[in-house]
Amino acid sequence: MCDTQEGGTVLWLRRDLRLRDQPAWRAALEEGGPVWPVFILDSLIEETYGAAPKWRLGESLRSLASSLKKQKSRLVLRSGDPLKVLRSLIAETGARCVVWSRLYDSMSIGRDKETRSGLNAQGIKVLEVNSSLLFEPWTVATQQGRFYGVYTPFWNAVQHRDIGQPLGSPGDLSPPDNWPASDSLSDWRLGAKMGRGAAIVSRYANVGEHAASERLDRFIVRGIGSYKSERDYLGLDSTSKLSENLTYGEISPRRLWYAAQNAMEGKRNAEVSYFLREIAWREFAYHLLYHTPRIIDKNWRSDWDNFPWRDDNEDAEAWRRGMTGIEIVDAGMREMYTTGTMHNRARMLVGSYLTKHLMTGWWVGEAWFRECLIDWDIASNAMGWQWVAGSGPDAAPYFRIFNPELQAKKFDADRRYRDKYLAEGRRPPHPNALNYFKAVPKSWALTPGQTYPRPIIDLSTGRQRALEAYRQYRNK
């Protein structure tokens, strides 16, 4: 427990922007005295967040600030080095304790270690808690005490664990009598790099804790009972879409876990169980991020280090713009640019097409997703790209190459998904398809009336090129 005789706690919020089932808030309140919630815009956020995640972060902060105001609290905004900011707040408030939720990437771990040491050196005690995962990475280990590198054994190890009941929302946020100065959220200009795309993506974003709770309730009632059977069909609204809210901590994975378990009844068990596995898949991504931090920017399997993937190239630019001439691939890329998210099946298809048909390194795709996704997650994005490329843990073998046309016939047989995001040749085009052209930079010179492009590579030719490259690489 922190010594609060001199008064109160600074609560450093990060990816835990909610009140319900928020262990960091609970820990701060249990220390007694007033609580000063603060969000710090530091260089790590500035450097790692792409345009869409940074814009979406601003929307989440705005929503949380509104919620706090209703409970007579505030969200203090500061920018700069966290240690300097926290020291300044401590001097201004007289707080003797700082609480924050743990993060698990090596950059955040290093920053937090330095911050904790600096605060401890001046007699400030620090309390770190878990607010974002079901199972912290070091709590799951093989019988040999090692981390898991394969998902199925990881799932078997965690599926029956007791994770504790979700916490309720605090009734009293212990607001102080006096508040330190705060930056203005508008001055941070978090959406500046989104350009005109922000106005379009905002139509599809589901921002804030209240919206996240409503989204979960709708999914439990309407979607979870057929989740396993329908989740891959691109034209159906059969997924939870909660990754956006999990990203900023607007809802906790524990609430998802308990809501799903409570929905298990009779014949729906197999459908619901598959959703639980998907929650645990996110946990697995953080398990690997913590134990093997190289997954973010290096091949997880080092034997792929000399594979002849191309760096950025003209074909990759066509892929980014949704102009490859392969409809299901282009629909996925345009969905992402228009809505800030992409159906999971489409993510696999566009990833396979880039890394195999176009022989382009997974890091090129990872960087573009980081720029465009409002549900960008440092662990899931990196693991997903390495999985589909073949260089990662639990990877789809490189020679397993998705055929976009066959996938479209199977998972978009009625063309509903393609017609929703492709405008060319449609009379009339779907509003979503038109919104893509309103969101993209004017410099791309794209219009809905243009002729749809021919494929930049024949699918059979691209497949054979990839397989030949793989054969020669393995034979070396």
Image: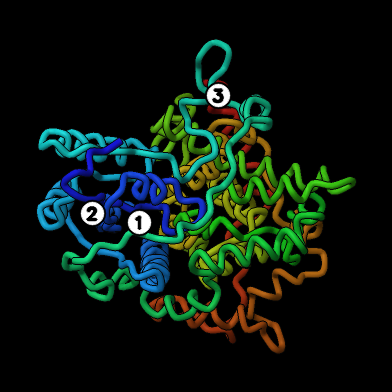
Circle 2 crowding by C-alpha within 10 Å: few under 14, some 14–19, many from 20:
some
Residue 203 spot, x, y in % from top left? 53, 78
Q: Quadrant of residue 449?
A: bottom right
Task: Answer with left or right where residue 327 lies relative to residue 76.
Answer: right
In this figure, which residue is indicated by the disc labeled 3?
A: 148
Circle 3 crowding by C-alpha within 10 Å: few under 14, some 14–19, many from 20:
many
Q: How far apart are the two marked residues, 1 and 2, measured between alpha carbons?
A: 11 Å
Residue 210 spot, x, y in % from top left? 54, 67
Tell me which residue sits at (11%, 54%) in the image.
88
Image quarter where the N terminus lies is top left
Considering every residue shown, the one lying at the far top of the view is 144
Tell me which residue sits at (52%, 44%) in the image.
385
Q: How far apart are the two marked residues, 3 and 2, measured between alpha carbons?
A: 32 Å
Depth check, mark 1 against mark 2: the one in front is 2
The answer to whether residue 167 is above or below residue 304 is below
Considering the numbered disc 3 on the image, is that residue within a helix, a strand or a loop? loop
Tell me which residue sits at (54%, 10%) in the image.
144
Which amino acid type corresponds to the residue marked 3 in the rendered image? Answer: Tyr
- State how many labels appear: 3
Residue 3 spot, x, y in % from top left? 22, 38
Q: Quadrant of residue 336?
A: bottom right
The answer to whether residue 323 is above or below residue 48 is below
In this figure, which residue is indicated by the disc labeled 1?
A: 49
Which amino acid type corresponds to the residue marked 1 in the rendered image? Answer: Tyr
Considering every residue shown, the one lying at the far right of the view is 267
Asked if marks 1 and 2 touch (Cβ < 8 Å), the reply is no
Q: Residue 42 carries which label?
A: 2
